[in-house]
Amino acid sequence: MGVPTRADLAGIPDYIIPGRPPGAILLNSNEGSLPPLPAIVEAVARAAAGGNRYPQWSSEDLVARLACALEVPESWVAIGCGSVSLCQQLIQAYCAPGDEVLCAWRSFEAYPVFARVAGVRARTVALDAGHRHDLAAMADAVSPSTRVVFVCNPNNPTGTAVGSRELRDFVARIPGDVLVVLDEAYREFVTDPDVPDGLRLAREHENVAVLRTFSKAYGLAGVRVGYCVAAPAVVSAVNKVAVPFAVSGPAQAAATAALAHTAEVSERCRAVTAERERVRHRLMAAGLSVPASQANFLWLPLGDRSADFAGFCADRAVVVRRFEDEGVRVTVGAREDNDVFVRAAEEYAAAECPN
Ligand code: PMP
């Protein structure tokens, strides 16, 4: 009969492993389409040559470089094995069984899963009609059990973002003993000047933590480095629950080297955001509804047509990510790959509503 797991594990969904059919165009995981810059690959190779030694305990060199770049003290920065790991660490550090984590829905799927893994209730608040966080409803939903609130800005999977004023009003309404986690995994793709830089809020409120990652804009999803910027008490709590040496030496070296190439990274992000707008306008011209995105992906709220659309794309060797009967998320990739996707979407829309 085997060893029984804890009883509630059966209720926790398995992670959806993204499909990667050979030769397919992968627009399903919000990855960068370009390989890391050569200087970063060299830094990884150099660090791998010292792989017989354990890495730095808390990524001290990287923390120093990030603190300098972000203009915060080193005590304000924690490094994680991807920012997803930091999401889990924050829940572990701040929540005990019976407590509650609050997030929008649909938003990043890891939040409710990590809550349940920690024996914590996940409470969700529906996005508004514009597929954006309903921050007023979220503030209303905070209860005495709420310990952590996630605000994913821009939101995965919808790409929508909240503005400065509404986020400030929201943070002002959250009790000081509740941690607000601003997940800014896609921050570097924001082009709307009204979308706030969470670091400013973190500097002003000791209950605000910001999460960012090297996975998206820096094209290092496979290397696994993310970071948390928050008041020192939050950083030390996050570090306390970390798996020792989870951030490998090559990962630390990659991120440290990447910080010396921010101009190239920004240029890559500009190309992605220009493509995002081009693709969005082509999709809308084909009659599809696509909310404005501030991330490196677009959201098609196709409802019960989502599976059909994703299947239609897959038949044309384009892998997109379907979210049940809600919609499809498509990553902005290389121009020629986006064109293959757009042609598939145009064909789908034309077949659906022939003129
Ligand atoms: N937050 C959000 C909103 C994400 O979409 C992702 C990745 N899909 C992550 C965090 C985690 O990214 P990583 O662990 O690669 O840094």
Image: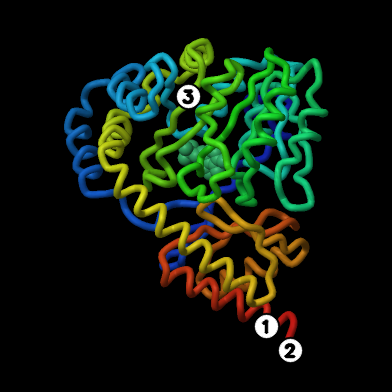
Front position in the image: 328 or 50: 328
Q: Say which residue appears at 80% left-offset and 15% top-offset.
A: 144
Instruction: Tell me which numbered mark, 3 or 2, is placed earlier along the sequence.
Output: 3
Three-letter amino acid code of the residue under disc 2: Asn
Q: Say which residue appears at 32% left-offset and 35% top-offset.
A: 255
Across and down, in percent, residue 39 comes to: 21, 44
Query: Is 351 rendered above or below residue 38?
Result: below
Front position in the image: 177 or 11: 177
Across and down, in percent, residue 334 comes to: 41, 64
SS class, disc 3: strand
Instruction: Tell me which numbered mark, 1 or 2, is placed earlier along the sequence.
Output: 1
Q: Residue under circle 3?
A: 229
Instruction: Determine if the C-beta at disc 1 is less than 8 A from ligand 1.
Output: no
Three-letter amino acid code of the residue under disc 1: Ala
Cα separation between marks 3 and 2: 52 Å
Left or right of 89: which side holds 227? Answer: left
Q: Which mark is residue 350?
A: 1
The quarter of the image holding the C terminus is bottom right
Three-letter amino acid code of the residue under disc 3: Val
Front position in the image: 180 or 157: 180
Q: Residue under circle 2?
A: 355
SS class, disc 2: loop
Do the residues under discs 1 and 2 have CB atoms within 8 angstroms?
yes
Instruction: Tell me which numbered mark, 1 or 3, is placed earlier along the sequence.
Output: 3
Across and down, in percent, residue 216 comes to: 44, 46
